[in-house]
Image (cartoon, rainbow, N blue to C red):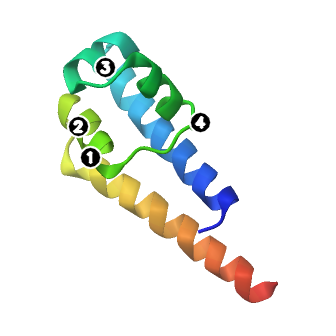
Amino acid sequence: MNKVGTHALASAIGGIVRRERLKRRWTAERLAHECGHSDEIISKIERGLQGAKISVLFNILWALDCSEEIFLEIVRADATLRQTAGSMERVA
């Protein structure tokens, strides 16, 4: 996946994390405390400025007690972006 696709995925994941955090009415600081990562990392992930390692992402989603559907939503976002990137490469 190219840089554009990587940024798009980071933004999509960040949006999902933020949505789930806000559904629980948690602050970024509380999420950081619950998952064991800094609020700076949480902020960067939510804004799509930093991709999350899978272990960090799992810690966040587990802290939020997300359902498997949320995990699958992230996988689908990744698959869609990869498919789109592949289609664009074939056209170019």
| Mark identifier at residue 55 | 1
Quarter location, residue 39:
top left
Q: Which residue is mark 2?
A: 59
Mark 2 to mark 1: distance in Å? Answer: 6 Å
Disc on the earlier residue, 4 or 1: 4
Mark 1: amino acid: Ser
The residue type indicated by label 3 comes to Ala
* Residue 29 in the image: above or below residue 62: above
Sooner in the amino-acid sequence: mark 1 or mark 3: 3
Q: Can you tell which quarter of the image residue 92 is in?
A: bottom right
Q: Quadrant of the N terminus?
A: bottom right
Residue 42 screen position, x and y as percent: 42, 26
Say if 39 sits above or below 50 in the image. Answer: above
Q: Is the C-beta separation of discs 2 and 1 under 8 Å?
A: yes
Q: Is residue 66 visible?
A: yes
What's the distance in space between the residues labelled 4 and 3, CA to CA?
A: 17 Å
Instruction: Compute the Cα span from label 4 to label 1.
Output: 18 Å
- Mark 4 crowd level (few <14, some 14–19, many ≥20, 10 Å Cα): some
Please give the residue where the numbered disc 4 appears in the rendered image: 49
Reading the image, the residue beneath label 3 is 32
Q: In the drawing, does residue 86 fall left or right of residue 59?
A: right
Residue found at x 19% / y 44%: 67
The percent coordinates of residue 35 (x first, y second) are: 23, 26
Disc 4 secondary structure class: loop
**Percent x, y for residue 54?**
32, 51
**Residue at mark 4 to residue at mark 2: CA–CA distance:** 18 Å
